[in-house]
Amino acid sequence: MKTFNRTTAAWIVMFGVSATTLLGFSYYEDAPFSAAGDASMLAFESGGQFSADELTREFGTDETASVQTAGISGSTETAPPAQSIDIEVGGGSFNLDGQEGEIYTVKIPYSRRMTERGTLQVTIPLSAVVFDDVLITDDAQVYGIGLNAGYAWQAFLKKDNVPYRWKITPSAGLFYRDSTDLKLGSWVFNTGLSSSFAWQFSPGWVVNMGNSVSFAWNNGIKNYPDPVRDDQQTLVNGLQLYRMLDRWTFGVYVTDTQALNDMQVDSYQGYGVTAAYQLTKSRSLRFSFVRETGNGGYSSSRGLLGSTWSF
């Protein structure tokens, strides 16, 4: 693939063929880290899993749950915080059919409890993707930003005194991508519906099954041709196992993502480990490592570091 890249670049120099036509589309918009790919994963994350803070609050002992809520204005010892804000940064590398590169991400989620069972969730994702040595010896960059909002409704609460929780989350988002190097760009509007069913099968042990379906509509920008051949529908299924030990929450998980329309990477699986620690009454820290593999010669590895503040 490196030889192919350099040969293609030579054709660009000699015959004036645009990098857009030869390189831009096949390497980016068919990848899991494209705008439509990010949108489908955010639809899943907004309601297809439980965060470490939610697990502690819903399944922890009275002592561990009160660590999160004690000292919060207007709350009782067992009432969940009314609001939280998060920041997560990540970085890693990928290989897409021989083309190598790096992925850098920032996510800023905010949640506000609107009713006893309903929570508004808003996430701002930022991303930068670097394709190594695409333009002769130069790298190419693609930048993205988005806004995703969901409303999580929880059927069972801790006060219901049952060993399981179930929540369903409709969501919608708008995502923007642009690259002057590859002459591509798009707006993606996405709607999704996700579900989580968590069961505490033993003290300190929780298993969760998450699912989501999302629908993405794409449109080119800046008079570029539409970089996506079709609107996309995506299914994501995941299984997580969590272990809670005092202020620690450990987890392992696997996800399976299937795009319903043909693309270079229309099926890939993710495998991850995570650890979270409750620093104070209102702050927690977590670290995750994710490995993804799929068809179309796709693989990636990345680490994520995040922190949550509740108030």
Image (cartoon, grey):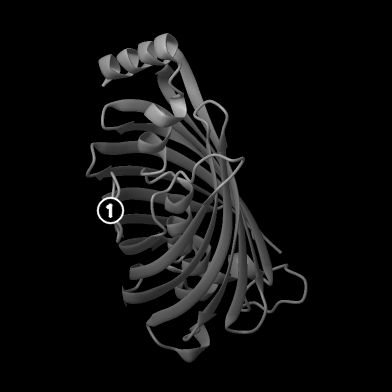
Identify the residue at the far bottom of this view. Answer: 160
Q: Where 52 sits versus 10, above or below?
A: below
Measured as percent of width and height from the top left, residue 233 is found at 37, 63
- Residue at (32, 26) in percent of width and height: 99
- Residue at (28, 53) in percent of width and height: 262
Measured as percent of width and height from the top left, residue 221 is found at 59, 44
Image quarter (top left, top right, bottom left or bottom right) of the C terminus: bottom right
The residue singled out by tag 1 in the image is 262
Q: Where 250 sits versus 305, above or below?
A: below
Amino acid beneath label 1? Asp
Residue 219 appearing in the image: yes
Q: Is residue 116 left or right of residue 228?
A: right
- Residue at (59, 80) in percent of width and height: 118
Q: Is residue 227 left or right of residue 146?
A: left
Q: Where 227 sits versus 252, above or below?
A: above
Tally the marks: 1
Residue 4, by quadrant, is top left
Q: Where 84 sits versus 264, above or below?
A: below
Judging depth in this view, the residue of 311 and 89 nearest the camera is 89
Identify the residue at the far right of this view. Answer: 73
Identify the residue at the far front of this view. Answer: 15
Measured as percent of width and height from the top left, residue 258 is found at 29, 58
Image quarter (top left, top right, bottom left or bottom right) of the N terminus: top left
Measured as percent of width and height from the top left, residue 8 is found at 34, 17
Q: Is residue 280 left or right of residue 6?
A: right
Mark 1, other Cα within 10 Å: few <14 / some 14–19 / many ≥20: few
- Residue at (52, 28) in percent of width and height: 141
Residue 247 appearing in the image: no
Judging depth in this view, the residue of 165 and 220 nearest the camera is 220
Q: Secondary structure at mark 1?
A: loop
